[in-house]
């Protein structure tokens, strides 16, 4: 087997007239190198102008998501060897505006996170002098949804996010669900009002790609379906027990 | 040049910075607080902390015991007034995080669960499986979104503190997306930029840990304290340096040499027992355990691998259930980065640079000697960590002193005087010119950033590793001096404004070289062995001369001036560090 591999990397710089293109680089194919190590080899040895985000290189900070051979991928935890003999095509995440090369604009995603009120909401102002009691089972109820690293691979995989940029999207809905399911939280009604709008859960067509690509095994698709069920129940309840705000 | 102004500006969006921001927003919603971070806050390196956060929780534990463990862990270089304040505050901070939604692991009855940790005599480390830093950071970030008064400058890279008439008045920063250089004025500035592990070649630290805030403060005239105190974590994966948490040993993991022997018993750390004993063997402090592993390397009792010598961390006897519930990330990391399953195979590990006990000199109120400048977290040195930080004390530190920095900054805003805006903006324009001329428009530089960085890292490993001596320290100091000169002639190929990561790499290299110089000269000056600072040529602790903090002041030309400040001793006179007996 060859000891090098070709990376075809998307290049785009809005200052140069703005035409995206691909540039090929030959990098060492080492058994313990991740795709990110290949990119860093380019940056450090071949072409210092290539722009991409990375930081922790241990799959937890969520910075280095890219399209690798068409799939949304966390590049710091994916071996180059998986793609041998290559070439490997590396592009910025789908469904986001591109800032430069492999860097995408995340402002809209950040705004969506904030929109779902991802914090503990208390209606009763109760502050215990000690911890809220929470059994391991109560923790388990929301735990997987708290493992999202905000890498946004799910947005790149979601066909609805591609078609409708207003769709709140998998990670933000999973985060709303995480707080709804937390026994310490009382904000479910606020979040239902936000997330059960048209651009929220009802936009999702249950393709399930979000859950397939999630590198942390969060299941946003399940969150959305459970959310739909809750929203429907609440909708029926609103006829029986009006909340006084419709 | 774009300008803006706020009451308080926080540099750094990790745990300490977010905690400060929330404290300010909660205390006084009329205060305009802004945060500059070179990454989105949830990307900050707090995210990589794994094991937990220590805070007295059980009835069988006391604040005094946490103090004593921290003080003896620090080899008596920690300030005892600061440590006492810290140990008192931590349980309240951890509880606050619980109220904000942090998914702490629980006992069957719903109470917070605690686990043992290295150097701690009682079980007091709160944890969220082995992703404690991740959960803590996301809880803080998400909670911060509640406050509309917190203004964020995400992906904005600070290049210089603005100082006028002896007081810090803001910062110059580059907005990465557009390349625009901004002057952001403030009445108080908090440095919360974390550590500088990237000064070393083999580190657990993320790519962003380049000592930015330490260097910014140092250049502005604030000294760096105890910089020679560099923590090596005993258990890093051999190729990547990825951290395998101390919780792996707290849950019962063993360290074995190539003969399968629990070698820590040969290093005055206790006798092996089947289940963990607090403050003993694998639950010893990090400095002593890393030194013991290095001892095995020297005795030829380690394995030899492509990335140097290593020993084994064996978790197999814990069983799959415990590993999966208590240490899921350890398993995930081993499978992904070493292709081994710790349920079935021992993990190869070697000591790895992990944490800076030193940092920007602050007092117990997070104030630096420069008016208007505060610091918290790894970037700061209060000091509670002295010559060796105990595992699970740093997450508490970012909370306690992040909040404290926030309160001190509020006070500074209330007592502040008017600034000379013209002088400040003139300084900002000077800085803009420096960035343009020395980096962005420069085409005649010849020194490669990557090459200088590698040479610096090699010099730091050689001079400031686990064991040090005069000869290699002098050699490293000379090398760093040479590199600082060569860094004035950097080759830049990328002259674009948009997201120019070569420009940030060049600026980061400058920060790292300043910090490296402070580390190596502080290490050269301290002629004794204490905690993480082990000198071959001065093998004993010398309380007569060095029961004192080193304080490095930057000088315009040549190496820093090193002075010493006495350690604050209140109720715990210096004694012998005893583990396992």
Image (cartoon, coloured by chain):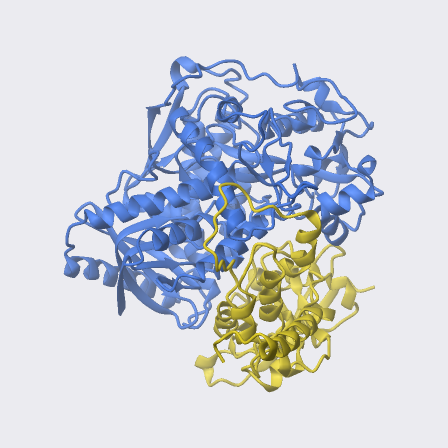
Q: From the image, which quarter does the N terminus of chain A lie in?
A: bottom right
Residue A30 picture location, percent across and down:
74, 57
**Horizontal and vertical percent position of residue B496:** 42, 73
Residue most toward the right? Answer: B344
Identity of the residue drawn at 39% across and 19% down: B569
B48 or B178: nearer the viewer: B48
A10 in relation to A126, above or below:
below
- Residue B481 is left or right of residue B288, and the answer is left
| Residue situated in front as seen by the camera: A150 or B93 | B93
Residue B370 point in image, percent of width and height: 26, 42
Task: Answer whether residue B342 is visible to the viewer in this image.
Answer: no
Does residue A166 sit above or below B83 in this rendering?
below
- Image coordinates of residue B130 in percent, x first then y, are 65, 45
Q: Nearer the viewer, residue B372 or B216?
A: B372
Q: Residue at x 48, y 46 (%)?
A: B96
Residue B569 seen from this side:
yes
Q: Where B358 falls versus B2 (above or below)? A: above
Determine whether, in the image, residue B325 is placed left or right of residue A203.
right
Tell me the quarter of the picture where residue B241 sits: top right
Residue at image location 58% in from the left, 52% down from the top: B134
Quarter of image, res B515: top left
Q: Which chain is yellow?
A: A
Say how many tags the image has: 0
User: Chain B: what color?
Assistant: blue
């Amino acid at each position: 087997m060859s000891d090098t591999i070709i990376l075809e990397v998307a290049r785009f710089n809005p200052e140069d007239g703005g035409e995206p293109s691909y540039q090929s680089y030959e990098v060492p194919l080492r058994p313990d190198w991740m795709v990110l190590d290949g990119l860093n080899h380019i940056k450090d040895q071949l072409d210092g102008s290539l722009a991409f985000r990375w930081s922790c290189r241990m799959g937890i900070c969520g910075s280095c998501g890219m399209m690798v051979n068409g799939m949304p991928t966390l590049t710091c935890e994916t071996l180059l060897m998986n793609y041998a003999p290559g070439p490997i095509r590396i592009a910025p995440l789908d469904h986001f505006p591109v800032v430069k090369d492999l860097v995408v604009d995340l402002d809209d995603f950040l705004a969506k996170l904030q929109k779902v009120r991802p914090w503990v909401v208390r209606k009763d102002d109760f502050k215990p002098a000690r911890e809220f009691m929470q059994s391991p089972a109560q923790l388990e109820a929301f735990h997987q949804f708290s493992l999202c690293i905000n890498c946004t691979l799910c947005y790149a995989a979601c066909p609805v996010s591609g078609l409708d940029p207003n769709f709140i999207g998998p990670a933000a809905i999973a985060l709303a669900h995480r707080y709804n399911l937390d026994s310490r939280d009382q904000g479910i009604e606020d979040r239902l009002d936000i997330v059960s709008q048209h651009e929220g859960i009802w936009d999702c067509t249950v393709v399930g790609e979000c859950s397939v690509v999630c590198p942390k095994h969060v299941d946003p698709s399940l969150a959305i379906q459970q959310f739909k069920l809750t929203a429907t129940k609440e909708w029926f309840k609103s006829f029986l027990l009006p909340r006084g705000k419709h | 040049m774009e300008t803006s102004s706020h009451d308080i500006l926080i540099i750094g969006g990790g745990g300490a910075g977010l905690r400060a921001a929330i404290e300010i927003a909660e205390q006084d919603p009329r205060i305009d607080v802004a945060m500059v971070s070179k990454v989105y806050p949830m990307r900050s390196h707090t995210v990589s902390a794994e094991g937990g956060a220590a805070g007295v929780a059980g009835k069988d534990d006391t604040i005094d015991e946490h103090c004593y463990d921290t003080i003896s862990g620090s080899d008596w270089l920690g300030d005892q007034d600061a440590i006492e304040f810290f140990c008192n505050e931590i349980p309240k901070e951890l509880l606050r995080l619980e109220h904000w939604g942090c998914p702490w692991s629980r006992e069957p009855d719903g109470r917070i669960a605690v686990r043992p940790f290295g150097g701690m005599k009682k079980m007091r480390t709160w944890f969220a499986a082995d992703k404690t830093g991740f959960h803590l950071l996301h809880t803080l970030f998400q909670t911060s979104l509640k406050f509309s008064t917190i203004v964020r400058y995400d992906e904005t890279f600070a290049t210089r503190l603005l100082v006028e008439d002896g007081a810090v008045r803001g910062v110059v920063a580059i907005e990465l997306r557009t390349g625009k250089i901004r002057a952001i004025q403030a009445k108080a500035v908090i440095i919360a930029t974390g550590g500088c592990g990237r000064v070393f070649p083999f580190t657990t630290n993320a790519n962003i840990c380049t000592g930015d805030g330490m260097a910014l403060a140092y250049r502005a005239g604030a000294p760096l304290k105890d910089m020679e105190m560099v923590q090596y974590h005993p258990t890093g994966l051999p190729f990547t340096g990825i951290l395998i948490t101390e919780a792996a040993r707290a849950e019962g993991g063993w360290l074995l040499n190539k003969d399968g022997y629990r070698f820590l018993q040969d290093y005055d750390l206790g006798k092996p027992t089947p289940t963990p004993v607090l403050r003993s063997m694998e639950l010893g402090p990090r400095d002593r355990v890393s030194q013991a592993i290095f001892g095995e390397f020297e005795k030829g009792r380690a394995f030899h691998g492509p990335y140097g010598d290593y020993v084994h961390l064996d978790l197999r006897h814990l069983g799959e259930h415990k590993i999966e519930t208590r240490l899921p990330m350890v398993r995930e990391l081993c499978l992904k980065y070493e292709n081994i399953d710790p349920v079935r195979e021992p993990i190869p590990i070697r000591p790895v640079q992990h944490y800076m006990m030193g940092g920007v000199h602050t007092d117990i109120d997070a104030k630096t000697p420069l008016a208007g400048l505060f610091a918290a977290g790894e970037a700061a040195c209060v000091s509670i960590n002295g010559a060796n930080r105990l595992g699970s004390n740093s997450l508490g530190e970012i909370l306690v002193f992040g909040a404290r920095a926030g309160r001190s900054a509020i006070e500074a805003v209330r007592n502040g005087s008017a600034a000379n805006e013209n002088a400040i903006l003139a300084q900002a324009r000077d800085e803009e010119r420096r960035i343009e001329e020395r980096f962005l428009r420069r085409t005649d530089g010849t020194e490669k950033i990557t090459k200088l960085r590698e040479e610096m890292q090699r010099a730091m490993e050689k001079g400031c590793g686990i064991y040090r001596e005069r000869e290699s320290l002098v050699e490293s100091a000379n090398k760093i001096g040479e590199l600082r000169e060569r860094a004035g002639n950097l080759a830049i190929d990328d002259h674009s404004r948009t997201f120019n990561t070569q420009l940030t790499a060049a600026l980061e290299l400058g920060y790292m070289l300043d910090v490296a110089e402070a580390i190596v000269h502080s290490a050269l000056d301290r002629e004794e062995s204490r905690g993480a600072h082990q000198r071959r040529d001065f093998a004993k602790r010398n309380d007569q001369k060095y029961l004192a903090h080193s304080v490095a002041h930057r000088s315009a030309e040549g190496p820093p001036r090193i002075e010493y400040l006495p350690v604050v001793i209140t109720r715990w006179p210096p004694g012998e560090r005893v583990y396992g007996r």
